[in-house]
Image (spheres, rainbow, N blue to C red):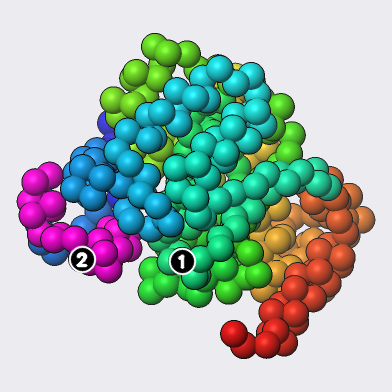
Amino acid sequence: MQRRMIAPCFMDDTLECLRRHNVEVEPLLASVGLPPVISEPIPAEQYGALWHAVAQEMDDEFFGEGARPMRAGSFALLCQALLTTETLEHALRRGLRFLRAVLDDPHGELLVRNGLAEVRLSDSGPLRSAFAYRTFWIIVHGVNCWLVGRRLPIRWVDFKCSIPPTGSDYRLFFGAPVRFDQPQSRLVFDAEFLRLPVIRDACALREFLRKAPANILVRYRHDEGLSAAIRGRLHATAPAAWPSFERLAAGMRMQAPTLRRRLQSEGQSYRSIKDEMRRALAMEALLNGSRSVADLAADIGFSEPSAFHRAFHKWTGKSPALFRREASSDADLRDNAPAN
């Protein structure tokens, strides 16, 4: 089985954070068998061991990036507090309250509108690093995925801070459009997932905590599992040329019913994967490009613009033109805002 790895750029972010808080990095690396300079991916389990070592050294599971330390053991208490919730929405709201109690800032609020669920971060202190916001998302989204037993596709992620040197890794990590220098930090996904039931119990929690936090870094990433292999195949092909399900199965040397069953075990279907990829392509093009909606529809595999309009409205509750205008308006407001 292929080992799940953590990219060097993620390690760069981690070590830069520790040095910023005057933590002796080399002894911690040595304690988990890592060299002083890391230029190759490392196993997720080894990064998880480093996370634990940092938490013990600093008595802070949030790497010193919150307004108050997230004392060692807080993550386990968070998970225990969520076991008695019934739905993802119930768990998410309780989890955000818990994190506010232990961190103070940054703190998150769940907003539901137009078919989207948005976790929006607020902070009474100075602007924090991209690493701080990403760590918050890793904890919240990773635990959410574990509670419901499936990966929850992300629509997009906004960061209030500027892009870090490792910014190109962020889109790969989240598997969704990522924007920096935004008015607010927020993570957005489909509101329909909020109705999913919490399926974990105390026995599952013991196993989960034994492998945490390495498991939340990789178990529910967009680039893990059979669905990731399918995404890789589709990424290499223009959307208009994506194969039928039967051709896809044949190309992967599997029977179609077997492939369908295995995708279902990951909480996915071929249609949901294609929709997710088309949605991400469309949003990124509308946010960052100037191509006409008709051209964009053809680019991402729709036979006619009207079909794309219907699909995009179903995904976002907005027309492509309105989505682009609102994004442009947000950018204008940000650019014209007075300097602090």
For residue 22, the mark is 2
Name the residue at 81% across, 46% down.
Answer: 113
Query: Is residue 29 within the magenta segment?
Result: yes
Name the residue at 38% across, 35% down.
Answer: 74
Q: Nearer the viewer, residue 257 or 309?
A: 309
Mark 2 closeness class: few <14, some 14–19, many ≥20 residues within 10 Å: few
Q: CA distance from mark 2 to mark 1?
A: 17 Å
Q: Is residue 268 visible?
A: no
Q: Position of residue 240 (x, y in %)?
A: 71, 55
Vertical comparison of 269 with 217: above or below: above
In this picture, residue 336 sits left or right of residue 27:
right
Figure disc tally: 2
Which quarter of the figure has residue 247? top right
Q: Position of residue 199 (x, y in %)?
A: 55, 17
The quarter of the picture where the N terminus appears is: top left
In this picture, residue 66 sits left or right of residue 211:
right
Nearest to N terminus: mark 2 or mark 1? 2
Circle 1 residue: 128
What's the amino acid at mark 2? Asn
Name the residue at 88% across, 59% down.
Answer: 319
Q: Position of residue 76 (x, y in %)?
A: 37, 29
Which quarter of the figure has residue 22? bottom left
For residue 92, the mark is none
What's the amino acid at mark 1? Arg
Name the residue at 23% across, 50% down.
Answer: 58
Q: Nearer the viewer, residue 154 or 257?
A: 154
Query: Is residue 148 within the magenta segment?
Result: no
Mark 1 closeness class: few <14, some 14–19, many ≥20 residues within 10 Å: some
Q: Label 2: state its secondary structure.
A: loop
Q: Which residues are magenta?
A: 9-33
